[in-house]
Image (cartoon, coloured by chain):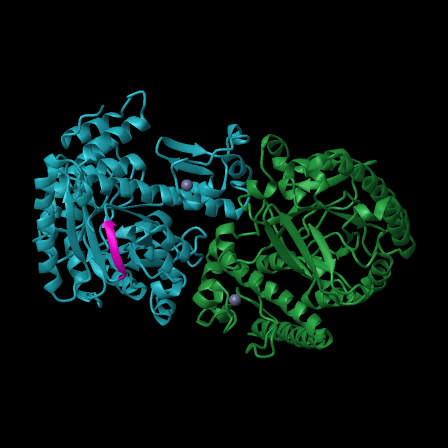
Amino acid sequence: MWRFFDVQNTTNLTQLFMSAFRIFKQTSTKMTENAKPLVFNIIAECQTTKARTSKMILPHGEVDTPVFMPVGTQGTLKGMLPEQLEEMGLQIMLANTYHLGTRPGPKILEKAGGLHKFMNWNRNLLTDSGGFQMVSLLELAEITEEGVKFQSLNKTKGEVMLTPEHSIEIQNAIGADIIMQLDDVVQTTVPDKERIALSVESTNMHCRTTRWLDRALKVHKNPNTQNIFPIVQGTLHEDLRRISAKDLTQRVVNGYAIGGLSGGESKDEFWKIVHLCTDLLPKDKPRYLMGVGFAIDLVVCSALGVDMFDCVFPTRTARFGCALTMTGQLNLRKARFAKDFQPIDEDCTCNTCKRYTRAFLHGIVTELPVACHLLTEHNLAFQLRLMKSIRDSVCEQQFPAFVQKFVFDLYPDKNYPSWVKDALTAVNIKLL
Amino acid sequence: MKFFVRSSTKRCPRLGVLRCTEGKSEVEIETPVVLLHTQGGHIPHITHEVFKLVSKEPQILQIPLVSMHSFKDTMTYYNGTISEFIGSKNSLTCLTLHDPSNLTKQGHHTRDKIPIWTKRGKVLYDADMYMDVVESFKPNMYYLLSDGDTNKTSPQKRIAKAVEQTVVFNKQCLERHRKSEVLKKMFVMAPIAGGYCLKSREHCIDRALFIDANEIDGFLIDGLHNNGPEVEFLPFEEIKSILEFSVDKLPPEKLCSVQGCWSPLNVIKLVQCGIDMFDTSYCHILTERSAAMTFQIDTSDENNDYEINLRHHSLAEDFTPIIDGCECLACKKYTRAYIHHLLTVQELLAPVLIMIHNIHHYLRFFRKIRQCIANDTLDEFENFIAGRYENYQRKTTSSVEDKIISENIGDNI
Ligand SMILES: [Zn+2]
Ligand SMILES: [Zn+2]
């Protein structure tokens, strides 16, 4: 049963039935279409903000959005068994194309029958293009029309070229449900607008990222089982973002990513670009904001209309003894936890919070591998719970109130960061 | 907790049961039993939640004090038991001093104190400090403090000192045990020190039995080695006479245990001598070297190996499980190729999967041992495992030779 039928607030009932009607209509039309690897059914929309909640149907099952996708770079997630992740309700995770393309490599993945089978994960996967990883791990040599050229780090000092075609070829071998086009990766902090413009627009009909999308779509071998998402580029320049979004929305794709953010730009610039992009992108397709996953960012960007997020932070920080809570982060290495016999979070239902005290975790974090497993489980549970709260509150038309409370709990002194205030004001939420 | 042995004939493989009645629930654990070796309260790499996927049968966790020393102060403020504190309140626990999977540094003795080597360095324990820990941890079973720092090469002086210290510790610990309400209901085991000297062993046993045999539920044949991976290669002939001598001297109705990463073949030989209790530290040292146990337990098992190293490049495209037909989660759902991949990229899940299989296999091995005792077929099983082990050794030495030859050829090219 749809959750929002339980809602007791009668003033909203008409709206609810309206949106319910919309969904059922949508579902019935979508169902009749032939096998499409992505069906995006909006279940409810917030009447105040741009937030919405949906059921996205992918080849390996449903994904409830807004969704946070943890990063399992090398076909595994920080020592967690896929059995555990499934039990926790995880519906989709990320894997990195550059890493998997290097080891075990596309040949072995193909022989294994794809990454799902190789790693025993029967739910959805998303892979990146590999470009971003290569920029951060190798020395970027040159970006040409053909692709991205890197200086290899090994002794032979050879050059490696990643082309849009090659990226898709590897991602076809991996077999993720959502795959990313290779985009022209320019850091947001690059001040050179001309260089960025080259990435976005050109004398040709459309920008390089769009040309690369066309090349990617052309070589894509599995359009019935894998969705290519193009990536809106243009860094912090609104005009370039507009051009990029306009170009990409003319292509036949099932969803879009917003790229080139979370690369060190100021939050004041960041939210404005997200706000702009969600306005530019079509309402009936999922929007994926790449590399964003801090709790406050998830809440604000959901309000701005983003549906999908990914970030290494929650799992990476677990290794260093950091536990996430609704009121901020706990660094369990701190001596003050040595005699603290509470769970990390009273309200968390994860196995770590059911079994362990902060005092015990304090004594094993950063010392034992199991400590990393335990904190990873909690931090994942935290992210999943946060996203569920967002979805539920959107369904119940309680999202603005949820946001107000969430931000207040995080900043009880009401010393709200200006970007949070501004971004939420832009979508009609006034903080408490 | 009480121990009941089914046959009290001396020096023979024996079946028994450890019965633990706490409140309404009664737990029975059959012997020969293998304790689950832990570090920081967990089987290395395995959370309690994951262990539920390996086995749902009641188990005893072996808690080496050295890995829990950092909680010593914390536990004095904590109301529950060590099993609750480590997040596994339904498990039984057995407190011991050293970690059998790690080589214990020798020497550094101080009068009436025993050094343990924590991550932050040496800590000296005397009987009182040790019993404080036992009292605040509240394990179901524990060993009295002992000086087990002897091995095959220990000089007589060290052996004599080890016995002298152990006798004193036993006496001091038991005094505390008698006085404490908390300690009273615990299963107490007295360590027997004395290295490889029969006379010293005899002296230690005499003194232990002299104190009060009724208060002691079991014994530990201590001081055979200094723990760590080397124990796997300890030739049984070296310990045989000491072991038989000690077991003969001990009252047959009491539990008799050893610690350490004994090889499967030596485990059987130890069982043949009448040892009732072991630990899974062997699984840990194998997992650390990326090795999975593959020795045959039932003759119906298909595999022909003894142990495989999952790092080996030949497994990169091997999409079969560690053991075909193995019922463990790692074998049912994952391939050698995947584990090999996880190892080459140093991912945390690799040792998790290997350990799941190793623990599963080792628990199965002990079930088989108990079956064989019941059917009176332990000799056959011993010969069978001995044959497998010999095969494996021949194969590994020849493959090392092959490698040397091929490397030499490589040099010439
Ligand atoms: Zn939790
Ligand atoms: Zn197995």
| Chain shown in cyan | A
Q: Quadrant of ligand 1?
A: top left
Query: Is any part of residue B114 visible from this angle?
Result: yes
Q: Residue B283, image x and y in percent?
A: 61, 59
A399 versus A179 height, above or below: above
A231 versus B330 height, above or below: above
Q: Residue A61, image x and y in percent?
A: 26, 59
In front here: B92 or A189?
B92
Q: Residue furthest right?
A: B199
Q: Is residue A156 left or right of residue A176?
A: right
Q: Identify the residue at image location x=34%, y=63%.
A: A116
In front here: B103 or B66?
B66
Based on the picture, tell me whether residue A63 belongs to the magenta stretch: yes
The main secondary structure of the magenta stretch is: strand
Q: Is residue B185 left or right of residue A323?
A: right
Q: Residue B61, image x and y in percent?
A: 62, 51
Quadrant holding the C terminus of chain B: bottom right
Based on the picture, tell me whether residue B332 belongs to the magenta stretch: no
In front here: B397 or A188?
B397
Q: Colour of chain B?
A: green
A44 versus A29 height, above or below: above
What range of the chain is rendered magenta?
A: A60-64
